[in-house]
Image: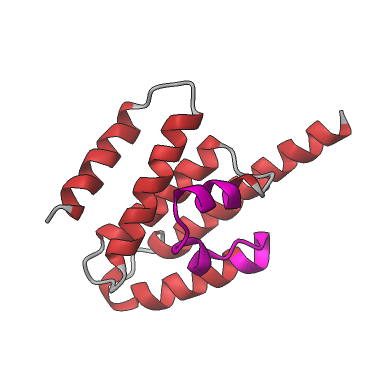
Amino acid sequence: MQHEDYIIREIKKFGLIISAFRNMLFGDGENLAITIENKVDEAKGMLLDEINFDLEMFLHLNDEKTSEYLLGFDGFNTENIESLANAMAEIGFNAQYGSSRKYLEKALQLYRFCSLKDNTYSIEREINIMAINNELQK
């Protein structure tokens, strides 16, 4: 029972941290084109400090290593992984950011991971996958 409470707390904590990550990047209405690189660096630091999640290293992992890395955290459930994928896709779709392709590829990897792990079909997830595939083919 105590272990279940711990996992639920971790999932909630990760959800809040990922929400803060997205809000830090996109929530203040500033001109994103000017500040995206600084915001991404700041958000990476927040993830590392708060939940020991190394986004820079994570971006370079293959499918298998990505799965292993995510499964190493008690707080990553499908919903939190999809929220992270949404944030990475938003960064990737920002043409002003120099590493946008890398973020789109990782978002696509995360969406596919969610599709494999989730028992529920998500039309929204599939639309996101198609949008990223279209952008990567350009």
Q: Is residue 69 above or below residue 91?
A: above
Locate residue 24 relative to residue 73 in the image: left or right: left
* Residue 122, picture quadrant: top left
Q: Judge left or right: residue 22 versus residue 15.
A: left
Give x and y (percent) for residue 83: 46, 45
Snapshot quadrant of residue 26? bottom left
Tell me the residue at 58%/46% (across/down).
15
Image quarter where the C terminus lies is: bottom left
What kind of secondary structure does the magenta stretch mostly adopt?
A: helix
> Which is more toward the observer, 5 or 35?
5
Range of magenta residues: 48-70
| Residue name at image x 30 percent, y 69 percent | 32
- Can residue 2 be seen here? The reply is yes
Q: Quadrant of the N terminus?
A: top right
Q: Position of residue 79 (x, y in %)?
A: 52, 37
Q: Position of residue 16 (x, y in %)?
A: 60, 49
Q: Residue at x 47, y 50 (%)?
A: 84
Residue 116's place in the image compared with 73, above or below, is above
